Image (cartoon, rainbow, N blue to C red):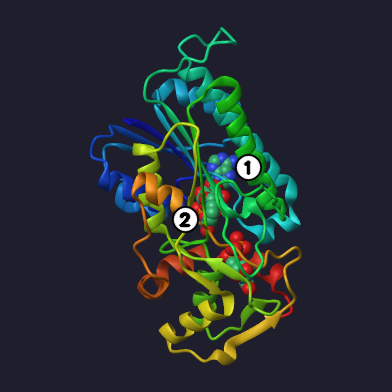
Amino acid sequence: MNRVLVTGGAGFIGSNFIRYFLKHQQDISLLVNFDFLTYAGNLENLTDCESDPRYRFVRGDVRDYGQVKQLFSEYGFDTVVHFAAESHVDRSITDPELFLTTNVLGTRALLDAAKEQWNIDPKNKYSQTYKPGVRFLQISTDEVYGALGPTGKFTELSPLLPNSPYSASKASADLLVRAFGQTFGLPVNITRCSNNYGPYQFPEKLIPLMVHNALLDKPLPVYGDGMQVRDWLHVEDHCAAITAVLERGLVGEVYNIGGSSEKTNLELIRLILRELEKSEDLITYVQDRPGHDRRYAIDHTKITETLSWSPVYTVEEGIHETVQWYLHHPDWIERVVTGEYQVYYARMYETL
Ligand code: NAD
Ligand code: TYD
């Protein structure tokens, strides 16, 4: 692991990962953040990394195979950490096509470029020999497994049963990654994590949206009965897990990453309101999301037993720290919620 391509590094998890990785991996000589800077990409998330001589930003689109191929030949990566995606379920309900092109075709372009660049005999279609130490890591989601009932957890062997256009696009990308491993022998891994939270998350997702609205004493839109369950994972725990997979993961393996922190949406919102000393009267029930998955929960035994990774944060500690971060970064939120966010919010929550 020496020359690393991070796609989608200007987004929430990608930017946290770049900061974490530059800090903890002194041995790498280059880290290129390749990001199209959609509404979700924000270079302000990485201002403290810009002075690191190992860090480079390149604006570009993972769907553009020509550009991706050029990037590989220019920088000679040995590691790809692929975060770039359309990531919000609600947006996938209004625009499924965008999710298919970015999440599926974008992953195809990266896989093909890696295969060509890393194969020691790229003209030979039967060649399965790659440069030593190369690795393609697909960052996926527990949502590919679909929804759980009140009990049980997703393991790596759970069937893929995605319910939203977002999760269907991520499952499709995962299957392509698997196929490149099986057919071409490309050294791949897939990680599937639960809902992340922490600093720099765009306020379309549950936690920053609720924090932002509560600070303004605006209604908190709870979909349906608010009893849906998510397994909350602090983004720093996620970054440590990704690093463990890059360092010690077995080629071809899938690893589930979870926070061991199941909460209903209502429990989580009440926790946030207590942190902010705001009234529960702000909670406002709104029409449910179509196809809303009832419960996710991750069994992370495999990564814990084989790679010695476990989450460190409890959700109570993590929410406290995260709420404090948002309280101390009002300028970041203000800049993020101008422009496109206002249009999105009005369309999504227009009855509030
Ligand atoms: P995000 O929406 O905050 O960031 C996505 C980033 O990808 C943005 O910087 C955006 O500009 C970039 N991007 C989008 N389209 C692109 C394109 N065509 N070319 C290049 N860059 C492009 O997402 P996130 O929450 O940081 O999620 C990162 C990854 O983790 C995604 O693959 C997502 O599916 C996965 N994931 C996220 C969560 C979560 O809770 N946030 C949970 C499980 C898995
Ligand atoms: P979200 O952050 O969109 O993540 P995901 O859908 O990928 O799990 O939503 C987390 C949970 O919060 C999910 O059950 C939907 C719910 N939710 C609301 O109740 N209201 C909201 O305004 C949002 C954005 C989410």
Q: Position of residue 139 (x, y in %)?
A: 51, 44
Q: Quadrant of the C terminus?
A: bottom right
Crowding near the residue tagged with mark 1, few <14, some 14–19, many ≥20 C-alpha atoms within 10 Å: many
Question: Residue 12: which disc?
Answer: 2
Would you name the residue on which mark 1 appears? 103
Q: Position of residue 298 (x, y in %)?
A: 52, 58
Quarter of the image where one finds residue 124: top right
Q: CA distance from mark 1 to mark 2?
A: 16 Å
Q: Nearer the viewer, residue 313 or 87?
A: 313
In the figure, 98 relative to 284: above or below?
above
View quadrant of ligand 2: bottom right
Q: Is residue 127 at all visible to an observer of this figure?
A: yes
Question: Residue 142: which disc?
Answer: none
Q: Nearer the viewer, residue 71 or 59?
A: 71
Crowding near the residue tagged with mark 2, few <14, some 14–19, many ≥20 C-alpha atoms within 10 Å: many
Q: Quadrant of the N terminus?
A: top left
Q: Name the residue rendered at 50%, 56% in the picture.
A: 299
Question: In this rendering, would 96 be left or right of 342?
Answer: right
Does the closest atom of ligand 1 sit within 8 Å of the Cβ of label 1?
A: yes
Q: Position of residue 38 (x, y in %)?
A: 57, 49
Q: Nearer the viewer, residue 348 or 157?
A: 157
Tell me the kind of residue under disc 1.
Answer: Asn
Label 1 residue SS: helix
Question: In this rendering, would 187 be left or right of 320?
Answer: right
Tell me the kind of residue under disc 2.
Answer: Phe
Q: Name the residue rendered at 71%, 55% in the picture.
A: 164
Question: In this rendering, would 249 be left or right of 281?
Answer: left
